[in-house]
Image: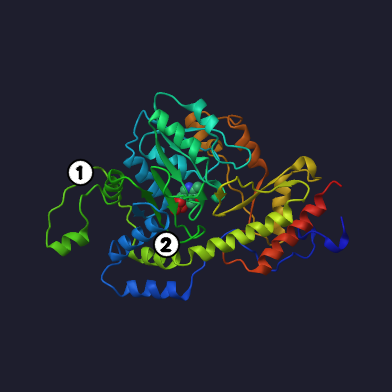
Amino acid sequence: MNQSERLALYGGKPVRAKLLPYGRQAIAEEDIQAVVNVLRSDWLTTGPNIEEFENAVAARVDAQYAVAFSSGTAALHGAVFAANLGAGDEAITSPLTFAATANCLLYQGATPVFADVCADTLTIDPNEILKRLTPRTKALLPVDYAGHPADLDAIQEIARAKNLIVIEDAAHALGATYHGKKVGSIADMTMFSFHPVKHITTGEGGIITTNRAAYYERLKLFRSHGINSDARKRNETGNWFYEMIALGYNYRLTDIGAVLGLSQLKRLDANLARRREIAAHYTRAFSGMDGIVVPHVRDHVEPAWHLYPIQVKSAKLKAPSGRAEIFKALRAENIGVNVHYIPVHLHPYYRERFGYRGGEYPIAERAYEGLISLPMFHAMTDQDVRDVVRAMEKVMGAYATA
Ligand SMILES: *Cc1c(COP(=O)(O)O)cnc(C)c1O
């Protein structure tokens, strides 16, 4: 190991003095003003900003309708309800995702069935979906991993042939395009998350976009206790009567969150442009580097780059504990790397409830063993980007076998 470049893990000087997170929000002065104005208004929740935000998101992704929720997870739960999934029904999803994608099925009594991912994009493999279909399959839940849309044409084709509903988890993919179409306009229902690490934030929040009026109505019902009118509209019309016609939840987004989202949405294009610039810079810098694989982008796809996940190939490195060691070394350099994701079926809850033992989804599991998410967020400075590249060169250089 070169003395002048001694790793921070072994007492060297870190590349940065302060930890660079893997993702974080960017709040502008105009966002703060917008929130302050709502705080002074009559409506803190389900006021005029909710519909305005919904319309703005729907317009941005070329969808007819949008229904905002208190979180992306609540939105997914709403989509599972709107799709009428329940006990005895199965839905096929990716194991390489956040637990919420599968949990939302369990909330409604349906069963998540996993299908392995494609080795290049780490999104669900349509051929693996075909192997998991049963007479009980009612829906498909592809995940646009890291912001790269799943193979939506092939997925839609299966759905049409088998009469299945497609609910797309696009928590990573606001602003992505697939064969010229915007994510949010393609699946039966598409979920976006507004958690602070995502492209735009409402604090906590999420949304479903759809082109079907029937889903739109059921989503609105589910969001507010299953009650068929909202308090503000009753107030306006001087009408006290309402009825609860389904078992819903209180999954409403606040007007405070909605106005923040509206304000943030104005900068989405600049945000996406910056993420694409950072991704291109990383890919140029890391493509020739031994021991790692950079994210693959398929033709006719424009990813939204929520994450920039590399895969460490330990066989090509002298790092005895592989990814774990590279991860620790990058952290020591104050690069806030992360791992997305522990495959859902390997979590203790899923192992115990469904009997998974590991080995069921070899492509997702092997990918997981090498995955490291490098910092990727629109407010990263050029210096931040250079720090990541320098830390990668330093760390990968130290463990290279050549
Ligand atoms: C963030 C995320 C969710 C859930 O979103 P929340 O808004 O945090 O509830 C679901 N799926 C994926 C893949 C996510 O990254």
Q: Residue at x 59, y 41 (%)?
A: 122
Q: Residues within 10 Å of mark 1 (few under 14, many from 20)?
A: few
Nearest to the observer: residue 313 or residue 65: 65
Q: What kind of element bears circle 1?
A: loop
Horizontally, residue 120 falls left or right of residue 132, namely right
Q: Does residue 36 sit above or below 11 in this rendering?
A: below
> Who comes first in sequence, dot 1 or dot 2?
2
Q: Which residue is drawn at 63% across and 38% down?
A: 119
Horizontally, residue 30 falls left or right of residue 222, namely right
Horizontally, residue 377 falls left or right of residue 185, namely right
Determine which residue is flagged by label 2.
202
Q: What kind of element bears circle 2?
A: loop
x, y percent for residue 141: 45, 39
Amino acid at circle 2? Thr
x, y percent for residue 356: 54, 30
Q: Residues within 10 Å of mark 2 (few under 14, many from 20)?
A: many
Q: Does residue 76 sit above or below 6 in this rendering?
A: above
Q: Residue at x 87, y 58 (%)?
A: 2
Nearest to the observer: residue 285 or residue 371: 285
Mark sitting on residue 222: none
Determine which residue is flagged by label 1.
245
